Image (cartoon, grey):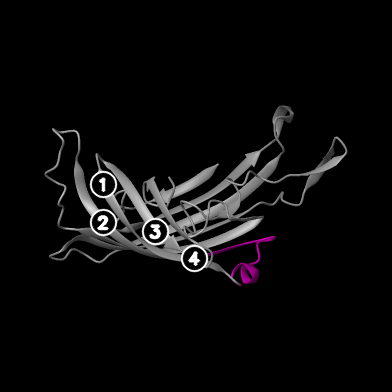
Amino acid sequence: MALTYDNTDFGANPTKGNYTRVFFDRDWGAYDNSIPWSVWGGEFSQYFSLGATEKARQRVIAFNFWTVDSPTWNSSHIENGEEVFHRPPTYKGANLGGLWRLRGYPATRFNDRSGIYYGLEYRHTLAWNPLKKYTMKGKLDVDWLQFVGFGEMGRVAPSWNFSELHKDMKWSAGGGLRAMVNHIILRFDLAASDEDMIAQLFIGQPWPKR
């Protein structure tokens, strides 16, 4: 269950406006196929247009905030003589690292009951497009190229505590190249952290995940 408010100008690649989403996920553990668990959270993105220049088709500062908590994390029951905790799958709960948040770490590198994340990107869409004329007989349409610089901070913790979530936060920073190809955004990011440097190739801007 989710409530979303979106007044951005273009969902795939916003240049202004904001996006807000609050949600509640619940697995009831029906028919003994899975354990019961709950997750609540929220996300907010804001986009600031810096306008065009002679060499830039668009210049945008993009900000993202995200947080989640699993209230059933410490709940449990006994099954076959063992204690089973009511915790969500890693991809559903408070996890950082991978394609979307803290890209300088492997996927789901950090996972706990609660999490918080801040991301900031500068997106510079070039006025120059050397691939515009290469259409491969109409099969390829490269609308624009975009250079990106970004920085991120986040933390997971065993409880949702504002003070604790903002201590010893993990970080990553890097840059990327993105392109609108056949109406789909292709994304290449190179991100560094205190543990690694990771290159990623994927589809779509990193957030928000619609």
Q: Earlier in the sequence, mark 3 or mark 2?
A: 2
- At label 1, counting other C-alpha atoms closer than 10 Å, the crowd grade (few under 14, some 14-19, many 20 or more) is some
**Residue 152: in sight, yes or no?**
no
Query: Which image quadrant is residue 135 in?
Result: top left
> Which amino acid, by three-letter code, is at mark 4?
Ser
Judged from the image, the secondary structure of the residue bearing numbered disc 3 is strand
Q: Report which residue position mark 4 lands on.
A: 193
- Give the residue drawn at x 27%, y 49%: 179
Instruction: Measure the alpha-carbon separation of dots 4 and 3.
Output: 10 Å
At x 21%, y 64%, the residue is 51
Whole-angstrom CA distance, mark 2 to mark 1, is: 9 Å
Q: Are marks 2 and 1 in contact (CB under 8 Å)?
A: yes
Query: Of the residues tagged 3 and 2, which is closer to the observer?
Result: 3
* Secondary-structure class at tag 1: strand
Residue 160 magenta: yes
Q: Identify residue for label 2.
A: 146
- Corner quadrant of residue 154: bottom right
Q: Residue furthest front?
A: 196
Q: CA distance from mark 2 to mark 4?
A: 23 Å
Q: Residues within 10 Å of mark 4 (few under 14, many from 20)?
A: some
Label 2: which secondary element: strand
Q: Residues within 10 Å of mark 2 (few under 14, many from 20)?
A: many
- Alpha carbons under labels 4 and 1: distance apart: 28 Å
Does the image show residue 169? yes
**Three-letter code, disc 1:** Met
